[in-house]
Image (cartoon, rainbow, N blue to C red):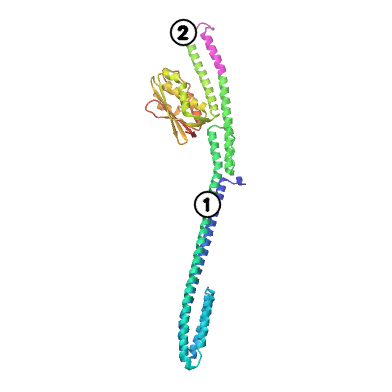
Amino acid sequence: MLQKFSFRQLLVIAFLLIAALLGAASLRALFTLEELTLQSRDSAARSLELSRLAQSLSELSVSMERTSRQSVVLDDRVLRARFADQARETSTLLSNLTKEGLPSVREQQWRSHLQAVDDLLTGPPETALDRERQLAQMFRDLDGINSAIAVQVQKIIQQRNSALEVKLEDSRSHLAQQVGWAIALAVAMALAFGVWFTVPLKRLENAIVGLGENRLDDVITIRGPADLAMVGQRLNWLRLRLVELDADKSRFLRHISHELKTPLASLREGVSLLEDGVAGELNHDQREIAQILRNNTDVLQGQIEALLRFNTAAFEARQLHRQTTDLLQLLEAQVDAQRLQSRARDLTITVIGKATLVELDPEKIGTVVANLLSNAIRYSPPKGVIRIELTTLQRLVHIDIHDQGVGVARADRERIFEPFYRGERQPADAARGSGIGLSIVFEYIAAHGGHIELLPDPVGAHFRIELPHVFKS
């Protein structure tokens, strides 16, 4: 189902899912914070209301004491009516305090004392002073009850504050857990999507590297988003085209070589017959012309054979048989194989480095080292020094080959690895090469995904081979 979407669409979907997850966590946090804010505001308002009720009860108690005592002394009905109003207000305050959590015992004590005060307001005039003293005692008792109510109110406020703090802490803990889980899940989703997206991209990279290394027998199949799968199909089409072009090139080289060999053999046979005098004795000039023809036919035959060797090498470069190989031993083995040639010129060959295990085709890399070492021996002066250095870097290995020969002319540096190209600086005491040795070296190194270059050196030539994928060292 997901393969119907493009890479861009899946990327947008992944971002939207992660954004939705984080957005939901943020909204949840916002709603929780809003709820806690409202609860805190309500708790503060109720605490203020509770404190106000307690304060009002205390103030009303003082006013009632003054009104009641004046009413008893003066026997004034207006003052009694005012006291009655204050009593009703006090009853309302007590009811509100009870609703806010005040124990009903305190309310009952207050109401019983209030009833006793109300009873003392009426009586004979001669008992007014005695009733006034009793009222004073009653209100002193009420002051104690008011103090107890104030203390109780403070406890209620503290309990509410503590409960609110506990709830705030629980909400903060739950919110932190939710945000933490949301972040962890978002990271996990991002990693999962990243790995899922990386797999087809890695396959594309491997497919492109395979084409670059001429691994044309491996079918390219990319499973994943629609556009990446389409790119995989295009790459597989390109692979098939490369296979066809390579087959056409090989077939063309075989045919042209065969077609050239037949007339060339006839030409060589005719020249031999002329030199043998079959068609009559040749004079000096004619014999010289026949010798020139024979030399050129030999050169042409050598070039045709070199062309076939290069074509074979280019084909074999795609057939790598990698195995874990100690590069140091491989270098030393190639030096030992050409020990006679180096002794004939009294050369000193040193190999510097440590054992390094690499996944490669030992036969083809051995051919590379053999060709470069053969050139170094061929171009080095007698009693010269050839130095081979093996260096291991991070996921790379370098092989540097230095000699003390004539080096490579500046004009030849850009074309040194072209097939059949021979530089201007050739040793006078050696046969002229075919010009395919370094081309074969280049093909074999490129097939391994490596690189070879000619580095500037004040004396002689300096070739560096760079190979990837160090196995272990």
Q: Where does the image place residue 218, in percent across and percent down from the top left?
A: 58, 34
Residue 368 sits above or below residue 89 on the image: above
Q: In this view, does 241 lie to the left or right of 374?
A: right
- Residue at 38% of width from left, 28% of height from top? 457
Whether residue 277 appears in magenta in the rendering, the answer is yes
Tell me which residue sits at (54%, 43%) in the image: 198
| Residue type at numbered disc 2 | His
Residue 254 image offset from top left, x and y in percent: 57, 23
Q: Name the residue under label 1.
A: 184
* In front of the other: 260 or 14: 14
User: From which residue to which does the magenta span run?
Assistant: 261-281
Q: What element carries label 1?
A: helix
Q: Where is residue 216 in the image (x, y as percent from the top left)?
A: 57, 32
Q: Residue 302 at x, y = what percent?
A: 51, 19
* Residue at the far top in the pictured view: 281
When the figure is inspected, residue 305 is found, relative to residue 79, above or below; the finding is: above
Does residue 405 show up? Answer: no
Residue at 53% across, 30% down: 323
Q: Is residue 302 magenta?
A: no
Q: How far is the residue under mark 1 from the one under mark 2? A: 96 Å
Amino acid identity at mark 1? Ala
* Mark 1 residue crowding within 10 angstroms, few (<14) / some (14–19) / many (20+): few
Magenta-colored segment: predominant secondary structure: helix
